[in-house]
Amino acid sequence: QPVLAVVGRPNVGKSTLVNRLLGRREAVVQDTPGVTRDRVAYDALWNGRRFTVVDTGGWDPGAQGLQAAVTAQAEMAMSTADVVLLVVDAQVGATETEEAVARVLRRSDRPVLMAANKVDDQRTQAEAAALWSLGLGEPYPVSGLHGRGSGDLLDRVLEVLPTSPRDQFSTTGGPRRVALVGKPNVGKSSLLNRLVGEKRAVVDEAAGTTVDPVDSMVELDGEVWRFVDTAGLRKRVKYAGGTEYYASLRTKAAIEAAEVAIVLVDASEPLTEQDLRVIGMVIEAGRALVIAYNKWDLVDDERRRKLNKEIDRQLVRARWAQRVNVSAATGRAVTKLAPALRDALESWDRRVPTGQLNAWLSDLVAAQPPPVRGGKQPKILFATQAHPRPPTLVLFSTGFLEAGYRRFVERKFRETFGFEGSPVRVSVRVRA
Ligand code: GDP
């Protein structure tokens, strides 16, 4: 889905305009400068086309000065969005900040549009025209308050938005997509809030928003990540009994929308069926996996010993997944999540060249030929990695290969080529 990023100084009416663009009536008023440190993403639909609107908020003017902060925000938008929309307050006109931002945006290789907001009457219409001076083309007069002009602006956005949306899992495009999943009460909300910064929860309450952002854009270790389907986590919605089925559907949907999943488990308690089920969902969906043991602050020596046994016994299926021991409560080791996500995605994206694969395979088959079936010795002719995401090995064989042998090949495939953090698949095509 193509991405439109909205940038601008605080108080220019960015959030009000975003709500207009999304066609919601209730405005999210979030004009206290510096209150949000992350960005939020919303799904938008206009004239039958879907796209994502990212409301960039991520700055801290106190720390670095307003101008530097907004400029950084524009740079972030340029690197993650398909189209950038700069919102300017027409009643105030172009300030030094807008001039600095315009200098940045003029260098962009993405289309940049400019909205002259707060054009509520004829007089400000003329003032809007003065914004031509920013060198970003025609200012689109809009009124976030009255909703004037937002339809025209959206038409214009659609004209410049890429028509064929990028690959859902483009690596060159937007931020990588992460699902944060796990059974209730393992600390998903707490961890999300910790990652996003302490102020998040406060912002949601203060805004009293009726608009559920679908995803959260979170900056970790210098990179923006898209945490998918976090609306429930942000609002700390607790599901009442009997809705486990729906919770499970949501988890599944989040995993499918993501490239990599962080499965959160409670380190202070024994692993449960439910934990294993969530891990299984990630493997079956073929997504990269990081297992985060949360509440590590509650783990003592005795629990730790038990834990190691548990991992050996119960996590056999996910032995290849990286484990990170964190505490959402104290912040322990949360900085280790981003490197683990990167490693897992690196494996998930990887492709082994066919030449290398077949050299490896012929040695393997020579040392350990597939078992005879029905008096015949199946011959494996050739292997290729059909695709990454997840890495899928296809064996061409003259006969059926038993599950045990396929697992053996899979294990050796991993041993030789790595793939830590990613499921791999082995399939067999029989050629008579
Ligand atoms: P969710 O249902 O997975 O979103 O879980 P919550 O984030 O709502 O957390 C459930 C409970 O666990 C809350 O009472 C949190 O305060 C607590 N909790 C979350 N993370 C930690 C942690 O790292 N250590 C401790 N001791 N408690 C935590």
Image (tube, rainbow, N blue to C red):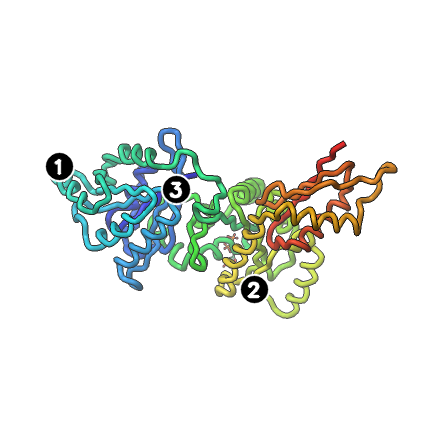
Callout 3 crowding tier (Cα within 10 Å): few <14, some 14–19, many ≥20: many
Q: In this view, does 191 lie above or below 40?
A: below
Q: Nearer the viewer, residue 287 or 412?
A: 412
Residue 63 in percent (x, y) is at 31, 64
Residue of label 1: 122
Residue 38 in percent (x, y) is at 38, 53
Callout 2 crowding tier (Cα within 10 Å): few <14, some 14–19, many ≥20: many
Q: In this view, does 310 lie above or below 287?
A: below
Asked if residue 310 lies left or right of residue 176, the reply is: right
Identified by mark 2, the residue type is Trp
Identified by mark 1, the residue type is Gln
Of circles 3 and 2, which is in front?
3
Q: Which residue lies furthest to the top in this view?
A: 47
Q: Which residue is drawn at 38% across and 58% down?
A: 199
Q: Which residue is drawn at 31% across and 38% down?
A: 21
Q: Is mark 1 on a helix, strand or loop?
A: helix
Q: In this view, does 222 lie above or below 15?
A: below
Residue of label 2: 296
Of circles 1 and 3, which is in front?
3
